[in-house]
Amino acid sequence: RMHEDIAEFPNRQYYGGLLKTGADVQKQPLCWPHSEHPLHHLFTRRVAFVPTRPDVRSKINEEEARLVVELIRYVHQLYGDKFDPTQTVGVITPFRAQIAQIRKLLNGAYTDVTVDTVERFQGSERDVILVSFAVKSPLQLRAIQSINAEGVDRKLNVAITRAREHLVMVGVEEVVGGMVDIAITNNCDV
């Protein structure tokens, strides 16, 4: 389902290099027209991580929620007439409180964009997946992980393998940075 740049991390981390791309489109470089929009740089690569600050509340990160809302709007702008809220973008976050915060900030807009938990997203895919970790401590991070006998975090694996074209993750780097060993590839000259 996903571009080879998105598959690179899960392929290396979880599948021992056995994943293969099935279509030429999964190997093509990504080039959007140049834009001065402050979020455009995230769309000059297939995988991006945006560090945020911890929120004092549990299971909510306001900064991440605001960024996710801005990203949804920018994805809509990028895709223009090709934007389909049921297929273009989806948001994955581990906590219902963060889902509610994102929906609150969307203020009734983008009701057909799926904003849900990893479990509810399993089996789905979108062109762009936005992941909001919304964790503020390593203890909270451990509580949302689902490590199998082989040492694979099944929830992280599902979250990062739902995207066909772009994966943008937002989270507190000090907490999730070690878990998300991201190789960021820039495929465009912008």
Image (cartoon, rainbow, N blue to C red):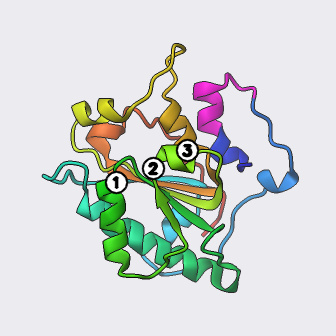
Task: Select label 3 or label 1 by which is in front.
Answer: 1
Q: Give, as a three-letter code, the residue at label 2.
A: Thr
The answer to which of 93 and 5 lies nearer the viewer is 93
- Asked if 95 appears above or below 126 in the picture, the reply is above
* Side of 23 relative to 77 (left or right): right
Q: Quadrant of residue 173?
A: top left
The residue drawn where x is 70% and y is 80% is 82
Calculate the distance from the C-alpha at mark 1 to the C-alpha at mark 2.
7 Å
Q: Residue furthest top?
A: 149
The answer to which of 157 and 95 lies nearer the viewer is 95
* Side of 98 relative to 8 (left or right): left
Q: Which mark is residue 117?
A: 2
The residue drawn where x is 31% and y is 35% is 141
Q: Residues within 10 Å of mark 2 (few under 14, many from 20)?
A: some
- Asked if 89 appears above or below 94 in the picture, the reply is below
- Segment colored magenta: 8-18
Task: Select label 3 or label 2 by which is in front.
Answer: 2
**Residue designated by label 3:** 160
Residue 157, magenta (yes or no): no
Q: Give, as a three-letter code, the residue at label 3.
A: Ile
**Residue designated by label 1:** 96
Q: Residues within 10 Å of mark 1 (few under 14, many from 20)?
A: some
Q: Residues within 10 Å of mark 3 (few under 14, many from 20)?
A: many
The answer to which of 73 and 100 lies nearer the viewer is 100
Circle 3 — which element? helix
Q: Give, as a three-letter code, the residue at label 1.
A: Arg
Circle 1 — which element? helix
- Asked if 104 appears above or below 138 in the picture, the reply is below
- Quick check: marks 1 and 2 in contact, CB under 8 Å? yes
